Amino acid sequence: MRSRIVLALCISLLLGGLLSAANFRFTGAVSELWSKPDNWREGALPGPGDKAEFVNGVSAVLDSDAGEVKQVAVSAGTSHLTLVDGALVSTNDWTIVGYDGGAEDDRHSLEILGGTFNANARVYIGFTGYGHLVIDRSGVMNLNGQNFGIGENDNGDGIVELRGGALNLNQFPLRIRAGANSSASMDFSGGVMTQAYSDANLDVVNGAIADGTITAYGGMGTVTVATTEDNVLVVKGLHPLNPVPEDGGSIVPGDLALSWTVDQGTLVDVWFGTDPELRGAELIVSKQAVTSAAVTVAPKQSYYWAVDTYAPGAVDPNWGQVFAFTVDNQPPSVNAGDDVATWLDNGSVEVAIAAAVTDLDPTTALWTVISEPNEGTAVIANPAQTETNVTLSAVGAYVLQLEADDGEYKGVDTLTINVFTDHCEAAKSLPGWTALPGDINLDCVVDQLDMDILTENWLGCNGLDCPDPNVP
């Protein structure tokens, strides 16, 4: 009887867990806001165990912290979900835009115009339906687990546009056109994609650029791929006008020279303002053959500008791409100095450390020990000074970090000090070290010891055709 009771209890708990999760369907009964419980069929907001469904042609807007949901599905009837400034949502399972249905010119869409979408599992754009992901302005999507797929399943059709903001992927390669008869495209026009570097990830990106799947500015621009010192792939687009500041970039406030590249003698109009659609923008250049214009930009502001070009003899211009940049205080630039190889002398060594910090504002600095062979074997004389000394008392690797703070943002850099038993071992650790001719015992000195070794083995032979020393 006891075992039956225990079994019944286990089944009850299991069913209770399964039943606690639900499909929460957004209806938009009172408004487009995700945050209003009355906009959901269930009369409550979805939680960590629930799927948030956007179906039957609804349009929803998230402008606040929605917490965590299990899944996000945008499908069935051409539905739309838009994140704006202040939005924050996390998923612990899949996110699919275009699960099924839709049409080539009427797609299910997820627009991240602001805020952050943290996807902790796979994201598919165009599963078996038509999906469209747009990241723009200050919007960010972070994929923290599993793959990002475009055109994932049979007949899936996915479009990804990075007009601004950032798409930050993990170590898993992009999945492109994984399904039969599937379609995929990705275009960069101001946004950036980052991904943990691997040869496989680089091959996928370069292959997609080569076959035209990944483009820039609708095919007019150039897709650039770079690798940072931290082994992060950075993919973005470069417009033929080579705008400065770069599209989607961030600069410091003050006087600024906008610049662009056109053929010599090309007449241009240049519009400049703070509205993404250039509503109310100022015409700062009117039909002139120039390649720069001076403006003044204020902190904590986004700016938008466009260069319209005139064909020879034309009355009306060809409208240009709208470029964007933000103005903000930049983090301090920190250089902790070159790595050091040194050695112990009477059980310790004192190393001078000197960092360079660059910032427009006054900064404070702090050295800290990130790692050391044994706790307490690194002692920094004046941690709050960029130039100071550190005393090291054990053989091994030490990692020191300098953090600079301008009151708003912080910049960091690290310095590695490798400590050896003596000067020779320290020298051997350096790239390109080679022994001196005659340094037989490899102690970095050619001396009598090497001569003694040579004399002792003079005329010795250890080849396969050496004479037998025991034969007279």
Image: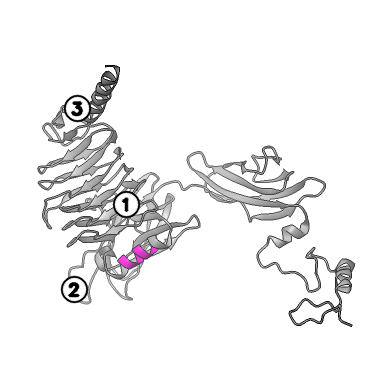
User: Mark 2, residues whose alpha carbon is within 10 Å: few (<14), some, or many (≥20)?
Assistant: few
CA distance for labels 2 and 3: 59 Å
As shown in the figure, which amino acid type bears the numbered disc 3?
Answer: Ala
Q: Split into 4 quadrants, where in the image is the N terminus?
A: top left
Q: Position of residue 96 (x, y in %)?
A: 22, 47
Q: Position of residue 131 (x, y in %)?
A: 19, 52
Q: Is residue 241 visible?
A: no
**1 vs 3, front mark:** 1
The image's mark for residue 314 is 2
User: Mark 3, residues whose alpha carbon is within 10 Å: few (<14), some, or many (≥20)?
Assistant: few
Q: Is residue 229 magenta?
A: no
Q: Report the side of 456 relative to 214 (left or right).
A: right
As shown in the figure, which amino acid type bears the numbered disc 1?
Answer: Asn
Name which of mark 2 and mark 3 comes first in the sequence.
3
Magenta extent: 202-208
The image's mark for residue 44 is 3
The image's mark for residue 147 is 1
User: Mark 1, residues whose alpha carbon is within 10 Å: few (<14), some, or many (≥20)?
Assistant: some
- In this rendering, is residue 312 above or below 417? below
Q: Are marks 1 and 2 in contact (CB under 8 Å)?
A: no
Nearest the eye: 414 or 70? 70
Q: Split into 4 quadrants, where in the image is the C terminus?
A: bottom right
CA distance for labels 1 and 3: 31 Å
Q: Residue at x 73, y 79 (%)?
A: 464
**1 vs 2, front mark:** 1
- Residue 449 placement: quadrant: bottom right
- Residue 245 placement: quadrant: bottom left
As shown in the figure, which amino acid type bears the numbered disc 2?
Answer: Ala
CA distance for labels 1 and 2: 49 Å
